[in-house]
Amino acid sequence: MLRLSLGLVTVFAFSVIIFSTFSFLPGDFATEILGQSATKSAVKALRAELGLDKPPVTRYFDWLGNVFQGDFGSSFSGRSKVQGDQGDRSREVVGLIVPRLKNTLFLTGVAAMLAIPLSLILGISAALYRNSYYDRSATGVSLVTVSSPEFFTAYIFILLLATLFPVFPTISNVDEASTLAERFYRTALPVFTLTLITMGHMMRMTRSAIINILSSEYIEMAKLSGASRYEVIVKHALPNAWAPISQVIAINLAYMLIGSVVVEYVFNYQGIGRLMVGSVYNRDLPVVQACALIFASTYVILNLIADLIGIISNPRLLYPK
Amino acid sequence: MTSNKSKELLLEMKNIHIDGFSDERWHKILKGVDLTLHRGEILGLIGESGAGKSTMGKAAMGYTQPGCKIIKGEINFNGIDLAKLTEFEKRKIWGTKISYVAQSAAASFNPAHRLMDQTISAANRLKINTTDVLKKDAVQLYESLQLPDAENIGDRYPHQVSGGQLQRIMTAMAMSPRPELIIFDEPTTALDVTTQVEVLSAMRSIVDKFNTAAIYITHDLAVVAQMADRIKVLRYGEEVEEAETRDMLSNPKEEYTKSLWSVRSLIKPEETNEDYMLSIKNIDAAYGSSKVLHNVSIDIPKGKTVAIVGESGSGKSTTARVITGLLPQLKGEIIFDGKKLSPKLEQRSKEELRRIQIIFQMPDTAMNPRQTVDEIIGRPIEFYQGIKGKEREAKVIELLKMIELDETFLDRLPSELSGGQKQRICIARALAANPDLIICDEVTSALDQIVQEGILKLLQKLQKDLGVTYIFITHDIATVKAISDEIVVMYQGEVVEQGLKSKILNPPYPDYTELLLSSVPEMDPDWLTNLLNKRSS
């Protein structure tokens, strides 16, 4: 309960930071749209229409109140800019974000489903055969993948799997009409990239968590009471490793989501990361704020889940004295 | 206990050589030790740390720790040479034919599983009895080990029961598959003396009941005397001597064996002083919301030694933390040499800090591993007395001589010193501040008997020469007899009594002091039997 409320406080604090950061950015949307030569009255009118003339504190609470009702406001761009313009072209932020968010969740979800089991298996086996050639090469390669930035990894994949050996497309264009198989095919390269950049970290941490536990006295005790190698790992080591492992997975899933900003840009994938980059470019505040808030909440939620797993897997916390 | 209950040989280990790899090279841990054990017999294996007794005990199962290997030797168990078996074959013997009881039960139970599941896991592997039968049997074992609530205690997790109970549950776990041999590896070393008595008697009766053979490993001769039919003394990986328990106690042949109980022969004549160095009055202290000290008042006479004794959790180390200012008290005051000390460390003057020094239990963790002896001792000289350069170096060497070391130690790192030498350096570091009061927090409990004796003698000599006052925190009554003038007995955060050594250690006792003193094992193989008879009557 305490954790949950702390999580809420964190998200709230994030919302303040996000809002104030963007509010204090130099320049505003009105001058950006109307250009340097705009008259003062025109700028003023647009500011009034967008609500930019109100004091920041009022604007913040208006925004927050609406967010609680699931309304992230309307996007600045696409609003009826000039009086008498035909029709209302304003776009709701929610309508803008939801399909993109789905795309991003699809991308990261597939990458996670590939990365998590793979890194657990690699990590555990590396711990089992510690200091073997297998272990050394696995930890070595993982260090390389962790250290290379995502755009670099992405371009390497494009070079290998799209240019030299054209197996997958370089541009991951998907829309509502794409079938699942098409989606898998088109997103293969960004999925590989995200998998690779997070797997190294997860694998290394799993390995060290298991090694740490394998040197504890209850493992020696288990061996001395005749437990087989498999039993030692699965029954005695793993149940005690879930807490650290789930922490690392949470951090990496969050990292994956943030990494998707770059990866989506590189592969021109219509996800939330790409939307956010575009909106920052346009000074489209409501959209940027909403995206940032979504990223922040995901971070908090993932960490909460990891904490929860830590508690459930540890009888010390589950059943106090 | 009768010796050699049967003449049927169970285990015969011949000429065991084991090497261990550490610090980048191979060391010899065991250099050709023999061992024989008959069915139903208990053999005590005794020696100081590094003697190889634990390695020998594990080798009896055909097991070596990671980084160790058996170089040579035969381990005949029931006619099978364990040294020649594969891992897979050995696993069929481990836990079922030979089981193992480890030193630290708290660390040796898997925290993620319930106690009952762990108790019957080895027996379950045999697939002779169903889980239900095994569980019923385990409850009976719990009962005969006098565990409270035997019916339900198995449903708990390891962290939910006390250390003494865990050790008994581990004995039940070892007994569950009805092995032919149990290895007890220092099973009571981590326990308080009052708990140790209960665990020892429970173990002894259950081993007797099922007529199981056992190897009992310990560094405490008095403990092993209660358990074993025969005792083997090891040192530096070699056998010193082996004899029937009674013969060994009444007539040890080797000089080394005699030295194993040397601290017990050290006794200091008591003196007291009406002039107090330190008085703490009505102290209450707490860690967070849990209160650990209740209205504690202690007077420490100038130039004398006051021993604070009690079990773990009695508040003796907390008292030390309050005196040094590491844990500010909630209530009460500390009068040091006639002046009131402020509770918080930050508010005390440098001079006040200098006059009270502390020496810790674990010299390994109390020293910076990257500093040389010169830096470790020189730093307080510079800090408190402002002495630098040549003069400082002369002072460091003087201190080294005081602790019976010399200038060749100046450039050594803590890792290049033995346990006893490390503790000596810690003493020198405390002396470097030229203090009036030194708090010694279990300073000898991590050390071997002979080394302990040396440290205690050194502390006494320093007191005579320099007139320092000691507060000596310990749970070991032999140490108390050896060093103290006055004794303070603590129990659950309260002072039970304070007085001269002769008064505390002689009747009449308050109930708790009596329990504490009577639980200290004596060099008499009948001690435990007599004690249990006396307590039950």
Image (cartoon, rainbow, N blue to C red):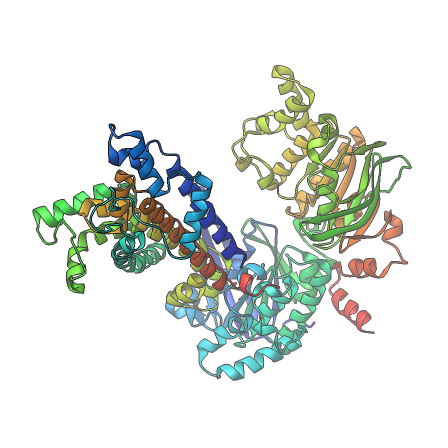
* Residue A41 image-quadrant placement: top left
* Residue B168 image-quadrant placement: bottom right
- The answer, for residue A156, to whether it is visible in the render is yes
Position in image of residue B407 (x %, y %): 60, 25
Q: Quadrant of the N terminus of chain B?
A: bottom right
**What residue is shown at x 70% (from left), y 58% (from top)?**
B192
Residue A100 in the figure: left or right of residue A54 = left
**What residue is shown at x 48% (from left), y 64% (from top)?**
A312
Q: Quadrant of the C terminus of chain B?
A: bottom right
Position in image of residue B66 (x %, y %): 43, 54
Position in image of residue A110 (x %, y %): 26, 59
Image vertical order of residue A56 relative to residue B243, above or below: above
**What residue is shown at x 51% (from left), y 52% (from top)?**
A6
Which of B353 and B193 lies nearest the eye of the viewer?
B353
Which of A104 and B516 lies nearest the eye of the viewer?
A104
Residue A105 in the figure: left or right of residue B294 = left
- The answer, for residue B210, to whether it is visible in the render is no
Q: How many numbered marks does the figure carry?
A: 0
Which of A103 and B58 lies nearest the eye of the viewer?
A103
Position in image of residue B331 (x %, y %): 79, 44
**What residue is shown at x 66% (from left), y 41% (from top)?**
B360
Outermost top residue: B390
Which of A273 and A117 lies nearest the eye of the viewer?
A273
Outermost front residue: A84
